Amino acid sequence: MTRFDADTPKERQKLFADAVVAHRNRGSAFLTVEADPVEGAGDEPVPWVQFAEKTFNVDCTDEELDRLKALLESFPEFRIDRLESPEEAEGTNVRITARSDANRLAGFIDRVFQAVYEREEDYRAWVVAV
């Protein structure tokens, strides 16, 4: 991979699909995508999506988890495998089994940032680990 960020839907789709392919070709442990923080949001944590083999990993607040469950209705081939809410954490870690091609996985990543983490259409995403 030669580029690691994108801020339009078409560019992000290609970036995420390329990252999935690179992850698979390299046999890396995981790939991680982050979105730029929202300006003026203060100490809001940077949202991220991690993918390893056939599993997505995301952290969600209760509201974000509700939005994630609603989003998964559009991806019937994906399913939640595990929800963990440690006492010391302020949210839930979600593991989602996702068996699909790179383009479908890329589309899901983009939709997570927009539908779950409420990023605007022109948000900037970064592939921070492949």
Image (cartoon, helix red, strand yellow):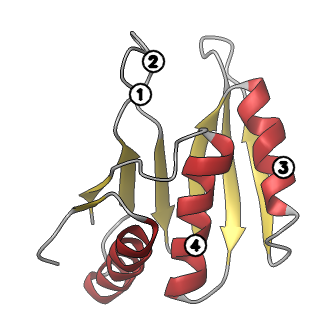
Residue 28 in picture, x, y percent from top left? 30, 72
Question: Is residue 76 shown above or below 92?
Answer: below
What quarter of the picture does the N terminus occupy?
bottom left
Residue at image point 50% right, 75% down: 53
Residue 30 in picture, x, y percent from top left? 38, 63
Which of marks 4 and 1 precedes in the sequence?
Answer: 1
Circles 2 and 1: CB atoms closer than 8 Å: yes
Instruction: Find disc 1 in the rendering and name its residue.
Output: 38
Instruction: Find disc 3 in the rendering and name its residue.
Output: 69
Instruction: Find disc 2 in the rendering and name its residue.
Output: 44
Question: Is residue 76 shown above or below 59?
Answer: below
Q: Nearer the viewer, residue 26 or 22?
A: 22
Residue at image point 44% right, 15% down: 41
Instruction: Find disc 4 in the rendering and name its residue.
Output: 107
Q: Quadrant of residue 83?
A: top right
Residue at image point 16% right, 70% down: 3
